[in-house]
Amino acid sequence: MRILILAIVLTLSACSDSDYSGSTYCYSDGPIVSNLALAPNSALVGEGGGTILGNVTLHYRTRDDAKIIAFEYRIEDVTGLKTVYGDFRKTLKNSGDFGFAMPISTATPGMYTVRVRAVDECIVNSKWADALFEVIAAAPVAGKSGYATVALNGFLYFAGGLDEDGLVRDSLLQYDPATQRTETRAPMPEGRELAAAAAHNGIIYVFGGMAYGFAQNSVFAYDTGTDTWTAVAPMSTPIAGAYAVTVDDMIYVDGAYGLSQYDPTIDQWTDNQDGTHH
């Protein structure tokens, strides 16, 4: 009798750890996810500045009154290597349709599998539901690497990078996805690979990158209206392989030493680490 009571106490204790709502005793067989759809299901390499938001829609069903508390997602390449992982917190019960947006990298061409599953309040997972996503190499960058890319006014721009011979280039290519036509624009003041790029108000900014074997702190601004480049305020720290994104009227550059903010209207930097301006 004492053993039976102890077993019941242990069972209730284990369930209470994962029973967030108090509505179930955690005997769930797990939720079900079906009819997964992804839009868009393809992108050009570098589209959206290297990352786009994919809109996921699915049908869910809970079982044994155990509510869904989250959806987990991951992206795998053809080898099954996990490239992105995250979760989306949401409480749902019964059955219905649901959707959310998830970041998808467009940095490397290839076929990827987007996987989504539900987790219920008993911490029981559904089976993975899968959808395919393809990153298509644009003609102007076939065989090249290390270039900076940014989308602006319906065009994709590819700045610098390594050519097929491994040489650092100063080229700027403008690619029209609608017509698949490529135009060569004015070259950068200097060649760069692994630079970051972002656009603001019709201007493309290229940050840092590698040149002469070293990371650089220079910033070049390209005016799409006049097809000209100018040097603007440099960064306090050289960077390579960083990311840049425009939010409202500010550009944020995430480098090896943290996040920096650039105000293109006054050509001024703010480093988040110490708040200094330069």
Image (spheres, rainbow, N blue to C red):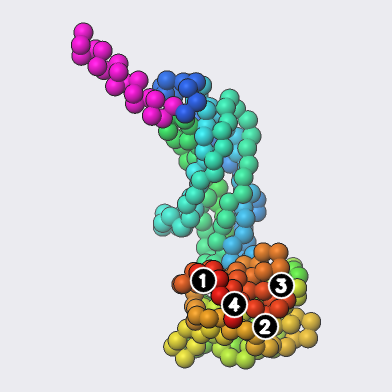
Residue lying at 65% horizontally and 88% vertically, measured from the top left: 231
Q: Nearer the viewer, mark 3 or mark 4?
A: 4
In the rendered structure, which disc, 3 or 4, sits on the residue that comes first in sequence? 3
Mark 3 lies on residue:
200
| CA distance separating discs 1 and 2 | 26 Å
Q: Secondary structure at mark 4?
A: loop
Mark 2 surroundings within 10 Å by alpha-carbon count, few (fewer than 14), some (14 through 19), many (20 or more): many
Residue lying at 57% horizontally and 27% vertically, measured from the top left: 93
In the rendered structure, which disc, 2 or 3, sits on the residue that comes first in sequence? 3
Secondary structure mostly taken by the magenta-highlighted segment of the chain = helix
In the rendered structure, which disc, 1 or 2, sits on the residue that comes first in sequence? 2
Residue lying at 62% horizontally and 45% vertically, measured from the top left: 100
Q: Secondary structure at mark 1?
A: loop
Front in this rendered view, residue 101 or 233: 233
**Image quarter in which the N terminus is found:** top left
Q: Please indicate, yes or no, whether residue 142 appears anywhere in the rendered image.
A: no
Mark 2 lies on residue:
221
186 within the magenta span: no
Mark 4 lies on residue:
277
In the rendered structure, which disc, 3 or 1, sits on the residue that comes first in sequence? 3
Residue 91 in percent (x, y) is at: 56, 33
**Mark 4 residue type:** His
